[in-house]
Image (tube, rainbow, N blue to C red):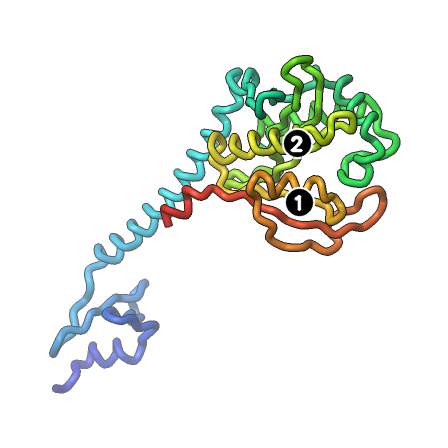
Amino acid sequence: MRSTHRESALRENTISQGASDIIYYVPGYFAPLALRRNPGNWNVVSHASRSTRRDQIHQKKQAKRNASLTSISELRSLMTNDYRSLVLAAGEKYRLVPIDVSFTEALFEAVHESRGELMHFVSWYYPEYSIEDARRWLQARERERSECRAYDFAITDVQTGELVGGCGIDRIQTKDRQGNLYYWVRTSRKDEGAATAAAAAVASFGLSSLHLIRLEIVVAETNFVAQSVAEKIGASREIRLPNRLILGGQIQHAYLFSLLDRTTESKR
């Protein structure tokens, strides 16, 4: 069968070809035409079908954006007075309460008492650490909490109310729904299970209440106690990170642990 002049012209100006549609650029037309080949003839595909496909793609993208916005909205909803009065149980001996500037003196005392250990295991401590540093840190964390980037808790003794240490989730990425889990305990209260109890409670809060899907824990290679805590709460040791931390002026390797929201795996 001989092709028509229009059909020949179209074939000479092919842009791309799919399984069922062939796209052509026709001289004199502003946009390419989509043609579908049927036995014995060519038909112009309705632009409406193309629009429908674009609409479907747009709807899928919009659904993903809405899901992200929902997650952010849920995070922000936790910034109400309900969150500020939130108390998490960490076993029978400890309670976790949102830490704020009212803990300034107690935080400084706990840090000063533990300076010998903290300088080897955390990056934020330095010998000149002062009560003003503690106050500024707490104020900064308040701002980060208002932006849904960090949730910090004071580990307190149920009986005495003493500040035992700190635990929380920071570096939160709302779009990817992940964050960093940290924990520390003052020297006079170590080896009592406070870090394990607190880390387990905050991890559960992050995965269940904040709807995060991944929590990461970065631990110095020489911090065997913190590594043990991570393993006790069910975190998986993923990889060794060379030159990951600078602690006490020394470059140190670290291990990356992770906790995952297992419910998301069943939805894949």
Give the residue displayed 66% in from the left and 20% down from the top: 156
Q: Position of residue 211 (x, y in %)?
A: 47, 35
Give the residue displayed 79% in from the left and 26% down from the top: 133
Label 2 sits on a secondary structure element that is: helix
Q: Nearer the viewer, residue 67 or 182?
A: 182
Residue 195 tag number: 2
State left or right for residue 262 relative to residue 165. Answer: left
Q: Is residue 236 visible?
A: yes
Nearest to N terminus: mark 1 or mark 2: 2
Give, as a three-letter code, the residue at label 1. Val
Q: Position of residue 5 (x, y in %)?
A: 19, 81
Give the residue displayed 66% in from the left and 18% down from the top: 157
Residue 218 tag number: 1
Q: What is the quadrant of residue 173 in the picture?
A: top right
Give, as a three-letter code, the residue at label 2. Ala
Q: Residues within 10 Å of mark 2 (few under 14, many from 20)?
A: many
